Amino acid sequence: MAEEKNDAIETAEEPAAAETTETKKEDTKDEPKEEKKVKMSKNVEKIIEAIETMTVLEMADLVKALEDKFGVTAAAPVAMAAMPAAAAEAAEEKTEFDVVLAETGEKKFQVVKVIRQVTDLGLKEAKDLVDNPGQVVKKEVSKAEAEEVKKKLEEAGAKVELK
């Protein structure tokens, strides 16, 4: 470990003119293969050589050590792309609604009749529901059915909310 630090210090003290080059082959459709030169310092070259000789487990340990040392994470960009998809699933349109009687209005008798039509409630239960607004008229119904019940109750003079 101490030798590695000394090597790093020695190479860091070398002038910038001591940079080496590595060649990469670049594929193009029309032209024959050309070699592209990338300039790297000796430090970078030594690190790459060390990584080339590592096993996968050693590389995983290296990543964990770097994350701990510098307080960063090596999360893949793919994970970030998956997050909006998960958020979209959570924000999907609601499929079941509760029809809530907010206010009865002036025509209580008409509202009682509509409530009896759209539910299986008797006269007394429907009247109690109309006398105590804020209660659920129909629970967990489809959007179409909830809209239909809302329309009927509003025609009778009541104010209705879908939750």
Image (cartoon, rainbow, N blue to C red):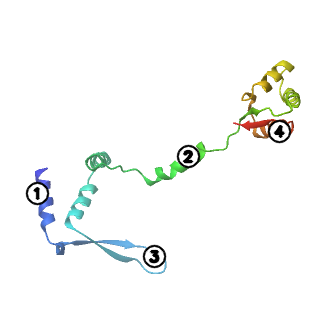
| Residue on which disc 1 sits | 6
| Residue on which disc 2 sits | 87
Q: Residues within 10 Å of mark 2 (few under 14, many from 20)?
A: few
Tell me the tag on residue 154: 4
The three-letter amino acid code for the residue at tag 4 is: Glu
Check contact, mark 3 vs mark 2: CB within 8 A.
no
Circle 2: element type:
helix
C-alpha gap between disc 3 and disc 2: 40 Å
Of the pair 142 and 115, the residue shown nearer to us: 115
Of the image marks 1 and 3, the number of the one nearer the N terminus: 1
C-alpha gap between disc 3 and disc 4: 70 Å
Residue at image position (43%, 73%) is: 27
The residue mark sitting in front, 1 or 2, is 2
Tell me the tag on residue 28: 3
C-alpha gap between disc 1 and disc 2: 50 Å
Circle 1: element type:
helix
